[in-house]
Amino acid sequence: MKLEVIAAGRATATRPTPLLLVHGAWHGAWAWQDGFSDALAAAGYAVYAVSLRGHGGSDGRERLRATRIADYVADVLAVSATLPTAPVLIGHSMGGLVVQKTAERHPTPALVLLAPVPTSGALAAALNYKGRIVIASDGTEVPPATRCAGGPVPASEHAGTAMGSTGNDKKSAVWNGASTSAPCYQTAVSGALGAYAQTGDATSVGSPGF
C-alpha cells in the first residue's frame, strides 16, 4: 500500500532522532504543513508527516469505512521501518490514540500527545446523536446528545456534512466538552482550520468537530 509521507529538515548531531507526525481524523499529512513541520525542521529535526491509509495522498480511500485503528498502527510501523532509527511519535487527536497503540507493540523513544483520543475511545461521547443510549468501551452509558439550546441534533448540523458551508442549517455540530453523562452539542463555526466550539472562533477551541 502506498502511503504519502511529507518530509522536511535533516537530522543534526544534537537532534539525531527523527520525528513522525500522525494526524487525526479527517486530516492528512497536509495538516502539519502550516508552520508546524517547518518549525520542527528549523529546530534541527528530520520531520516526517504520514497520511494514514484512506487520507491525503495515501491509498485505501475506497476501504476507509472498514479501516480500523489497528490498520493505522500498521501504517505507522511501516513508515517507521523506513527511517534510519526509531522515531519519536507525535500524534494529534485520533493520531494520539494511534501512536499510543503503536507504542504498545513497538519500542518507541518517546510519544508526544496533542489532544489525544483516550485509549477507551471517544465514539460514544462524541457521536451519540442517534437517539438511543450508547455504551462506551469502558462500560459508561452515554445518553443521546441534545442541542445545548434544546432539541435533538440533526445530521445536517454534524461535522462532515457540508463542512465550511455558510448556511446555518449546514454548519457542524460540536460537543461542548462539558459532560459525557449528559452530552450537549452546539452549532460550530466552520473555518479554514476546521470547526470551532465554545465561543465559535479560532482563538478558543473548546473541543474538536466531529
Image (cartoon, rainbow, N blue to C red):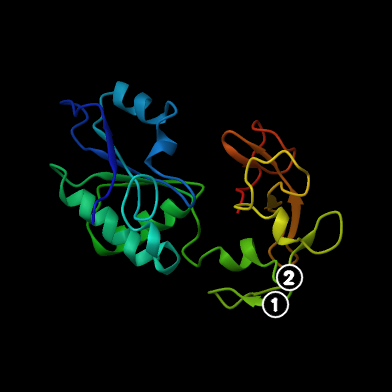
**Location of residue 35 by image quarter:** top left
**Location of residue 165 by image quarter:** top right
| Position in image of residue 69 (x %, y %) | 39, 64
Q: Which residue is mark 2?
A: 144
| Position in image of residue 51 (x %, y %) | 35, 47
Q: Which residue is mark 1?
A: 133
Q: Nearer the viewer, residue 50 or 77?
A: 50
Check the picture and name the quadrant holding the C terminus.
bottom right
Amino acid type at mark 2: Pro
Residue at (68, 51) in percent of width and height? 174
143 to 51, vertically: above or below: below
Is the residue marked by circle 1 packed among few (<14), some (14-19), or many (20+) residues within 10 Å? some
Residue 178 in view in this figure:
no
Q: Is residue 163 left or right of residue 78?
A: right
Q: Is residue 101 left or right of residue 165?
A: left
Name the element at disc 1.
loop
Q: Residue furthest right?
A: 150
Pointer 1 with pointer 2, Cβ within 8 A? yes
